[in-house]
Image (cartoon, grey):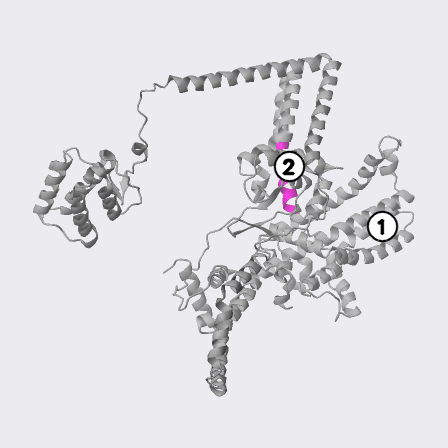
Amino acid sequence: MNLADLQIRAQVRTPWQALDLGVLMARRWFRPLWLAWLLPAGIVFTLLSLGFADDPWVVTLVIWWLKPLFERVPLLLLSRYLFNERSLKGLTWRQLVGTWLVGAPGALLWRRFDPRRSFLQAVTVLEKQKGRARSSRHRTLAYGSGKAASWLTIVLAHVEMLLMLAVPVTVLAMVGDFLELDLLWLFGSDAGVLAHLSNVLTLLCMSLVAPFYVACGFALYINRRIELEAWDLELLFRQLAQAREAPRTQPQAATLAGLVLAASLVLVGLGTAPVEAAEQMNIQTSPAAAQEAALELLSAPPYVIEEEVTEWRWKESTESSKSDADLSWLESWLDAQTSASDGVGEGVFRLLEVLLWIGAGVLLILLARSLWRHLGQPASQPPVLPAEASAPRVLMGLAIGADSLPADLNRAVHEALEAGDVRQAMSLLYRQALHQLVHRHRVPVEPWHTELECAAAARRHPDLAGSQLFEDLTRVWLHLAYAHQLPPRQRVEQLLQAVQREWA
Amino acid sequence: MQASRLLDNHCSVETPEGIDFSQAMAGPVVRILAFLIDLGWRGLIYAALGMLAGFLGGFGLGLFLILTFLLEWFYPVFFEVFRQGQTPGKKTMGLRVVNEDFTPVGWGGSVIRNLLRTADFFPLFYVAGLLSMVLSRRFQRLGDLAAGTLVVHVDRQQAPRLDETIQPRMPQQALSRAERQGIISLTVRSRTISEPRQQELADLMAPVTGSTGSEGLARLRGMGAWLLGRK
């Protein structure tokens, strides 16, 4: 068992996803798994059919009972395919027979009705566990996955039955009404050739389902092993360790190569070296060559996608004409329906007509309403300024809406100053200034702008171009907010007066 | 080439920006179970409707037939369009219907895939659909193939439960994304993997931890806890 050869992507999956992976496994290796089930079962089936020619039901029963044994060789094959061993090399006949015999009585008697059979079979067949060790192993593995394993058995048993029913039903559907077959004769008789034929059908259906059953159970088992033994992590860690080793060895090699090169240059002499270097430079920087290289790159797969189409497709034109034909067919059918004109059909069409008229009326009303609304709006009304709607209410984390600011700025600032809260006072001033900027002068400010960007926007605005006030405010506020430098009280009062003068 | 041959139940879609999205496709067994759960729910509704219809006589029978028609054809469509591609059965099994590019399924896709149930039903009980599911590359039944839809497993991300006794420690060197993911995975799964096995794994990461054995494992787990946000 070499994890590097693992043929599935190592990953912990949910039990249901593990079942899906099992379907994929069965699909990839279907033929060998199917033959490995069908050949031994076929031999036993033939012998039994010869022996119990008069009691065909015994054959099916025995084959069904022996299922756990027939599933063992496919399981063995799967366990080898999973690690990319495509042959049974190294397996002796003894081992192969041993695969059939190990734990056979238990599998056929008291564990025959365990619904988790395909999941836990690997413990007996592959791990060769016995007795108490086996049951404790079963408990460990079944934790969390036992439910999915049981459902797998239940579902696939029904799928098997469905297939057995589907084949005769398909045949009957294909034959049609031309032959009058007595169905009771088909299903009811339990002796004769027909019963043996139905046995063959049963065997074939079982053999079709078996690879999926084995592979799904095995996938559940492998999923638990990946989870418990962290195969995915081992693969990942090995890869990572390699990746960590690689760059460490590469620089060493590079420096070594450099040393050799330097030595050889010294040995050859200085005469030739510059010429070679110049030639190399030429090759690398010639624009024509670079262009050629670029063109070559551009004509390769990631840039040019060539698609080879090997299937037949309808031309666009024929498709459209086909749909036309479909419509005319529908029309003629409708005509036929109306001309038949029994009472029910007429009633349905009248109802449809009424519905259509109602729909048209509703559409007209909706149209008229929207038209009226459009015309009813007085033309003189000034359009709503988009700035009003989109003006930010919060800038740099400061609320600047009118409702967040005090009505009496003068008093609020003085109160804050009396309380010794210079920061609060400056905040009020700065926010008031921002509010005026955004909502009165409509300076184009975005919610993500910084203080300096706001100042720059104010500078560009024609109303405020001459004013130094906002610049001053910004500077003082920045020093206060980020450097914690409190401005003197007079400065704040001075700014307050300026603000009130500017935006009285 | 070897890597792409590995069996995997995931399929991926690449966006024009070169981002790979990967989803686990849902196979026959889960989908059959989801279907059966839906069938059970519908059966309950039919039983209730049948009892009500019984009181109403002939009119009740007509109503029952109409409702049966609607329920049979539009029950999945309703849930797939309005409940993020999940009928009750699919929700129970953790499945979801999506378009082939993993976008939510719309009216068109859902109606087509459910109308074509008749094709999947042939010859009886969805045998054709089952065969199509097993044979098609992404477990699609005929309706899915026609509508360009997929059934995928819904990712259920569980919050990692960490052992409280692990002492978080900062990694001493820069870690690649794969390394971080691997270390976190080992830390989170430390309850399910046996201790000697964990040490064996930690030894592989000796270049990162700088030590081996139980000390290396402890360091690796500490890094995992640190990477998961315990400081």
Q: Is residue A389 magenta?
A: no
Q: Position of residue B222 (x, y in %)?
A: 42, 65
Q: Residue visible at 53% across and 70% down?
A: A242
The residue carrying pointer 2 sits among few (fewer than 14), some (14 to 19) or many (20 or more) residues within 10 Å by Cα, namely many
Q: Is residue B33 magenta?
A: yes
Query: Magenta region, mostly helix, strand or loop?
Result: helix
Q: Position of residue A155 (x, y in %)?
A: 69, 45
Task: Give the Cα separation between the discs numbered 2 and 1.
Answer: 42 Å
User: In the picture shown, does residue B86 fall above or below A253?
Assistant: above
Residue at numbered disc 1: A59
- Between A209 and A172, the one lying in front of the other is A172
Q: Secondary structure at mark 2?
A: helix
Residue at numbered disc 2: B113
User: In the picture shown, does residue A128 fall above or below A112?
Assistant: below
The quadrant of the picture occupied by the N terminus of chain A is bottom right
Q: Amino acid at mark 1?
A: Val
Which of the numbered marks, if any, corresponds to residue A43? Answer: none
User: In the picture shown, does residue A443 fall above or below B208?
Assistant: above
- Between A309 and A362, the one lying in front of the other is A309
User: In the picture shown, does residue A84 fall above or below A112?
Assistant: below
Q: Residue visible at 61% across and 30% down?
A: B74
Q: Amino acid at mark 2?
A: Arg
Q: Is residue A433 left or right of residue B158?
A: left
Q: What's drawn in magenta, residue-wise?
A: B29-43
